[in-house]
Amino acid sequence: MQDEVIRYENAGIHFGSKKVLSNFSLCIPKGKKILMKGKSGTGKSTLLKIILGFGKLSEGSVYYMGRPLSPQVAWQVRKDVAYVSQDMDLGEGPVRDLLDEVRSYHSNRERVNPEKLHILMRELELEKDMLDKNFENLSGGEKQRIGILISLLLEREIFLLDEATSALDSELKKRVVDYFLKHTDWTLFVVSHDREWERDGVKIVDIGKNGSD
Amino acid sequence: MASPDISIPSLILCFLLLVIPLVISYRIKLRISRTTLDAVARMTVQLGMVGVFLTYVFDLNNGALNLAWVLGMVAIASYTTIRNVELKMEKLFLPVILSFTVANLSVLLYFNEFVLDLGNLLEARYLIPIGGMVLGNSLRGNIVGMGEFYEDIRRNENRYLYSLSLGASRYEALIPYIRKCLRSALRPTLANIATAGVVFLPGMMTGQILGGASPTLAIKYQISIMVALYVSTAMSTTFSILSTIYTTFDEYGLVKKEIYREKDRGKGKRKGEKEKKTHRT
């Protein structure tokens, strides 16, 4: 249990009066790759957001590094964990400025390495002139790749990926999944409908069939 | 040379002009007839009362009373701001009233002391009308600034949360919103300053000229008052936003949903939705 990263205990989520999830328990140790699937509206995205302190469980509890989630823990999670959300919204303006903004956050200051940016952009098939385009004019797939790019730039080792590859073509999907899975020390908690993630070494949690584990 | 008197029948003739916006409202279904009549009626009653009170206050010219009068205006301005931006009083009134007081009073006293060089800083004839102008402008700036800030945070919540997830502190994640709303808040005042004299003769100057002052003197007053208005608006809006952040966000850095007045659950409807149920207080 020493190296558990995230653990849910009898977690339940209600939307209003509707119970969408109950008795969900899951332990994610360091280095583990988890793929969570299931019908939409079953609270998968919410489970990820809760770790970041963006929502609360209706019942049960969630632990990060063995500590129950509290404001302090949530602020720590936000520094440790890279999150790519379903609907990437970075703001308005050129991508370059938005990246600079992220880089300017105190907690990221020493982390972001400018050389790495170009390597990663090539990896994600992002052209250089992408940096000068306005974020709001990018296509869904491009926004998604910018989101992935940022998550990788921050050099964090725990990833919460919420449908992070849904708008990519199959070639790119494969590439991105390869990239994430080749880092054996990374902890991945993925919510996705993409078959591409169903590989050896990835543990599948089907939330529709009442959260096992 | 005093201005000619306006008799009651002439005032009625003036009110007659309101038929025009009322007809427009009726034809285009603007639904602002009620609001227009309410507003004009309120204005008439308020100004009528103020006229009576001010006569006494000016006669007494008691420093403490004058200051109290200005503080009363500060309280009303703060209240009006919060009500207009569709937020709830509890969490906001204290920071807003403090911001208004600090920003406006300091500019006002500085103005009286160093610009007008008054013997008595709390002289009613200056403190109250200038205070009113400074506050009125701050009020407008704050309604735009605070309104846009809290609306934007709500509408673009995902963007804000995403910044937090990237390791931003609350302030770091909010700064783009703060920048944007302060720009909007100050833009009208800046436009007024830049077009003063070309597009319109500002109210204060018009008043002084009507009252018989020389245009040169009226212009000097106008220039200094516009600077004062800009400074106090910039200060009060900045203070209001920065100070309310402490009471409107929780320990997780999320905006407290309960500060918003109208409860719309459906996330689907966003923009146009606002106009409908705003009035009625």
Image (cartoon, coloured by chain):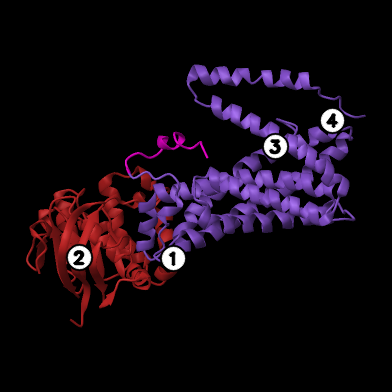
Chain colours: A red, B purple
Nearer mark to the viewer, of 2 and 3: 3
Dominant secondary-structure state across the stretch colored magenta:
loop
Q: State the CA–CA distance, disc 3 to disc 1.
A: 45 Å
Nearer mark to the viewer, of 3 and 1: 3
Q: Which one is in front, A122 or A55? A: A55
Q: State the CA–CA distance, disc 2 to disc 3.
A: 57 Å
The residue pinned by badge 4 equals B210
Q: Measured from the top left, where is residue B42 in percent x and y?
A: 65, 34
Q: Amino acid at mark 2?
A: Ala
**Label 4 crowd (10 A; few <14 / some 14-19 / many >=20):** some
User: Which region is colored magenta?
Assistant: B266-281
Q: State the CA–CA distance, disc 3 to disc 4.
A: 23 Å
Q: Amino acid at mark 4?
A: Leu
The residue pinned by badge 3 equals B46
Q: Measured from the top left, where is residue A196 in percent x and y?
A: 11, 56
The residue pinned by badge 2 equals A11
Cβ–Cβ under 8 Å for marks 3 and 1? no
- For the N terminus of chain B, give its image quadrant: top right
Nearer mark to the viewer, of 3 and 4: 3
Secondary structure under badge 3? helix
The residue pinned by badge 1 equals B169
Which of pointers 3 and 1 lies earlier in the amino acid sequence?
3
Q: State the CA–CA distance, disc 2 to disc 4.
A: 73 Å
Q: Which residue shows up at 56% across the image and 30% down it?
A: B35
Q: Measured from the top left, where is residue B140 in percent x and y?
A: 61, 43
Q: Which residue shows up at 81% across the image and 34% down it?
A: B207
- Tell me: residue B10, above or below residue B56: above
**Label 1 crowd (10 A; few <14 / some 14-19 / many >=20):** some
Q: Which one is in front, B239 or B91? A: B91
Secondary structure under badge 2? strand
Magenta stretch encompasses residue B279: yes
Which of pointers 4 and 1 lies earlier in the amino acid sequence?
1
